[in-house]
Amino acid sequence: MTIIRIIKYAFFIAIFFTISTKEFKVISSNECEAQNTDSVNNFLCPFEKIFYAFEIISWTVFAICAAILCFRYFRERFEENTILESFTSHAEPQNAESERREWEERNEEEWRRWEGDRQSWEEDRRRREEERRRKEEERQRRQREEEERQQRNERRYYDILGLDINTALPRDIQKAHYRLSKIWHPDRPTPANYTKEQQQEKYKEIQNAYEILTDPTRHYEGNFSQRREERRRKEERRRKEEGQRKEEEEQRKEEEKKRREEEKQIIEQEKQGRQREEEERQQRNERRYYDILGLDINTALPRDIRKAHYRLSKIWHPDRPTPANYTKEQQQEKYKEIQNAYEILTDPTRHYEGNFSQRREERQRKEERRRKEEGQRKEEEEQRKEEEKKRKEEEKKRREEEKQRKEQEKQRRQQEEEERQQRNERRYYDILGLDINTASPRDIRKTYYRLSKIWHPDRPTPADYTKEQQQEKFKEIQNAYEILYDSVRYYEGNFFEN
């Protein structure tokens, strides 16, 4: 293609410079006639010489490229004729066989190279998939670490205020901050065994914890059950994503295995196809050699082959007279074909020497073997389909069991939550000395009023109790009363509904 382009461009350039040179000659002659002089070298002579030189160069390039193109064309035709003669000649079958083997080797090498490229593409794809999955796992791990860190910080802030993260209310946070501020505020007297700097550091921690727990942009203000439910939902979502990822990985592995089996089956089929083609080609060559000797491939014996060769040699041997309507060269070519067919059919390394019945039995055995392999392949295919169907059913059953197990786990957690709430509620009724099944809101108020007269810090300390024990007892009574009347943590219906 490059030679053709050069020829085309050189031809057009040569035509351009040829026309330009003629135009310069016409202009020069007109100028000379106008001035009545014979010299034309004074008018446009340098340009004319340059264009003339380019004209010669262009035509030279055109001629050289045309000669190269013709040489290539005739060389390709000569090579094609040589290859064709090597394939069509019966006197040199070994060269054709070697070229056919080389051609098959080239095809095999091309197939192996394509298979290597495909495997490298598959490896790149798997590597990218693993990299993406690794990044996703890293992102989820960081997210879980961030959530755990936030939970630890939240618990630490509650511990600083001396509260329980599962039971504390916003009102409890305010009370704890007010109580601790009266002790640790820098304007208050320094507690015993503490310095002024330690008092200031302690107050900064208390103030920071109070600001974070009361700031809606920095802390979740829901109660303990809502926070636990939120964490449980996150954990379930994480487990679900993990299960989906594992299922996708298993499905991808199954698809990869199935694809490899299909490729292996395709390669095996192609190999069998090439073997059948080779057998058919050998049979065609064998039939052709029998046709050259004028014999039937199914009935001819080795003795018949020798007789036919002897009979034809007396006609076509170069030392015999040339038959009518044939030249000496045609007689020689015919004898070469006969001699080649006889040598091949009688050579044990190049032809099967058994009689026609043995050859027929051999072909029947090959056909039976091929049918048996085909039947085995169909049975394997059916068995593989049955296994795939069973695997899908097992996968479906496993998913249903997993779903049922998650449902049972969810119900169990709900029951545990309800039992825990009932135990807490029963404990608060026990503190007030009431029965959970019969106590009414009026009974709760009366009991709280009665116990406050006994255990209030402003009342006299009961016998066998210290002031601190009295204060702790009153805190428990006060906490139970507030929780049983709190609209966020207790149902305010009557005692029959409870």
Image: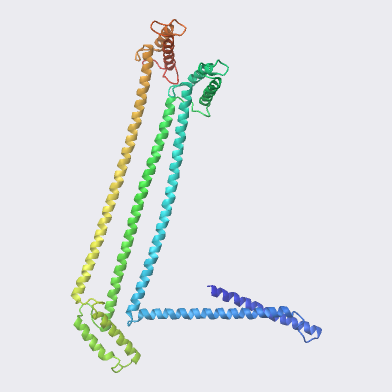
Q: Quadrant of residue 42?
A: bottom right
Judge left or right: residue 62 versus residue 292: right
- Seen from the viewer's position, the closer of residues 280 and 423 is 423
- Seen from the viewer's position, the closer of residues 192 and 30 is 192
Residue 458, position in %: x, y?
Answer: 47, 7
Residue 372, position in %: x, y?
Answer: 23, 62
- Seen from the viewer's position, the closer of residues 258 and 122 is 122
**Colouring scheme applied when the structure was drawn:** rainbow
Asked if residue 55 is positioned above or below residue 364 in the image, the reply reads: below
Residue 346, position in %: x, y?
Answer: 23, 81
The C terminus appears in which quarter of the rendering?
top left
The number of callouts visible is 0
Judge left or right: residue 26 versus residue 139: right
Asked if residue 213 is positioned above or below residue 493 in the image, the reply reads: below
**Residue 327 visible at all:** no
Residue 266, position in %: x, y?
Answer: 33, 61
**Residue 343 visible at all:** yes
Question: Which residue does the image show at 69% across and 81% down from the upper left?
Answer: 22
- Seen from the viewer's position, the closer of residues 301 and 146 is 146
Give the farthest residue toward the right: 35
Give the farthest residue toward the bottom: 321
Question: Which residue does the image show at 23% across and 88% down from the upper left?
Answer: 310
Question: Which residue does the image show at 78% across and 85% down from the upper left?
Answer: 33
Question: Which residue does the image show at 37% across and 49% down from the upper left?
Answer: 252
